[in-house]
Structure formats: structure tokens, C-alpha cells
Image (cartoon, helix red, strand yellow):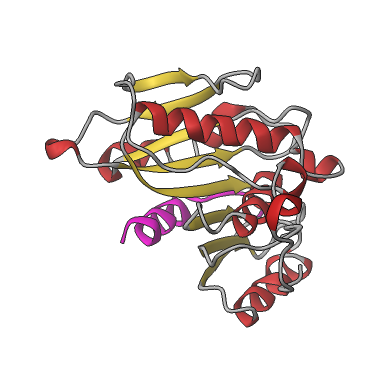
Amino acid sequence: MSDSAPPTGASAQGPRHGRLTTRAHPPVVSGPTGLVPLPGGDGGRPAMAYVPEPAAGGAAYRLVVLLHGAGGVARQGLDLLLSMADAQHLLLVAPQSSEASWDLIAGGFGVDVQHVDALVASAFDGYPVSGVTLGGFSDGASYALSLGLANGDLVDAVLAFSPGFAAPPLVRGRPRIFVSHGVDDRVLPIDVCSRRFVPHLRGLGYDVTYEEFPGGHDVPDPIRASAVEWLTG
């Protein structure tokens, strides 16, 4: 990835640049809680969402969009942090990719950007939100990193569990970043993935927390807990 100045104006907008256009706003309806479908309003399939009960005093949620790995389903993204959502007041949204994996992996940003954008807008419509996180595992982590770096003016944190790469077509803002990777990962080997681009991201000025763990292509429970502590601390 490059830290060169991004395109500006209309040329820097739209799904092909990985740009999310929605912005936070007060909710216009009162959305349901629990495990619910979240409509995107863009013609795409609803996402799975988990919404904890409102906090005392109506405190805002942290919105966390979680992206499954290649060949996966939305529920796999949701399960990354589901066990900790209530305690940490996390509004989890787990989309389904339009193809076997996310559009960037298949050849460039496009329809999946539009779908994520619509789902974030839907979350803003139904719930009080303070802070937007993109996260994912494997190809979903690569997508979360790439989309997050392109949207640091909306996304303030990225969770990347065992990512393969970061390839934003432009960069905006400086989201903080959490990366984890197993030292024995044979699907996305650590030496050519996280150990290569994490130092590059730090060199570009990003605040990156990086954790390696003994194991393969996985997200162990201690890593999940560490990521949530980092996110909410």
C-alpha cells in the first residue's frame, strides 16, 4: 500500500475507491434488540446483527462490522465477538459477501462496499452509535484492513485476525489497528503477511497493536479477549 495523497473530490468517492459515504446521525427509529436481521436498503441480502439491550442512560453502542473469511457465511463473522457483545455494549453486524469472498479479493471494490455502506446507514438509523469498527478473519480481515484504511474519516478502529494483505486504493484518516496472527498459520503464512505489512503500517504512522500466538489459522479465545479489551479500553 502507498501513503501518497489520495484522490480528492468526486474522483475519490464511490465504491470503486472503497469509500463509505454514510455518516453517523441520531437514530430515526427504535431498532429491535437481540439476534436480528439488519436490512441494508441497497437491494442486498440482510446482514445478521446482534444488538445488546440498551444501556442505562441510553449510552451509545460501538458498531462493529465483522467480515467472514473466504467461503464462509455471515454467522462466522458474528461469532468472532458474540460472546462479549453484551458486556462491552457492542452492536455487531455481520454481512454476507456477494461472492465466495469479498469483492476486493475478486478483482476490485464494488458491490460489497455498497452493501457495507447501506448496512452501516441502517445501524445508524435504528440505534445510537459512537464509534465504528471494521473487523474480520482471514480474507475478511484483509478486506476490513483495506476498507478501514480507505475510510479513516468514519472508521476509527480495525480488527484484523490473521489477515493476508492491506490494499486500499486510497487512504483517509488514521484508524487505530489491532492485528493478530498465528505463528504456524499455513493458510496465510505469517512471514509473508502480518510480519511484512505491520512494520510498514507503523512506518506510515498508524497506531498498530500486534499480537502473535502459538497456533495456526484461527482466532483463539485469548486473542478475542485481548482484541475487545484493546477496542474498548
Up-down: is 146 above or below 200?
above
Image coordinates of residue 173 in percent, x first then y, are 55, 65
Residue located 53% across and 63% down the image: 177
Q: Is residue 220 left or right of residue 108?
A: left
Image coordinates of residue 102 in percent, x first then y, are 74, 38
**Is residue 217 covered in magenta?**
yes
Nearest the viewer among 138 and 123 is 123
Which of the 4 image quadrants contains residue 192? bottom right
Query: Start and end of the magenta stretch?
Result: 216-233
Nearest the viewer among 81 and 214 is 81
* The furthest residue to the front: 9
Q: Is residue 193 left or right of residue 37?
A: right
Nearest the viewer among 219 and 90 is 90
Would residue 51 be visible to someone looking at this image? yes
Would residue 138 be visible to someone looking at this image? no
Where does the N terminus fall, quadrant-wise?
bottom right
* Prevailing secondary structure of the magenta residues: helix
* The furthest residue to the left: 57
Residue located 65% across and 78% down the image: 199
Which of the 4 image quadrants contains residue 50? top left
Residue located 55% across and 48% down the image: 135
Nearest the viewer among 23 and 199 is 23
Image coordinates of residue 95 in percent, x first then y, are 59, 30
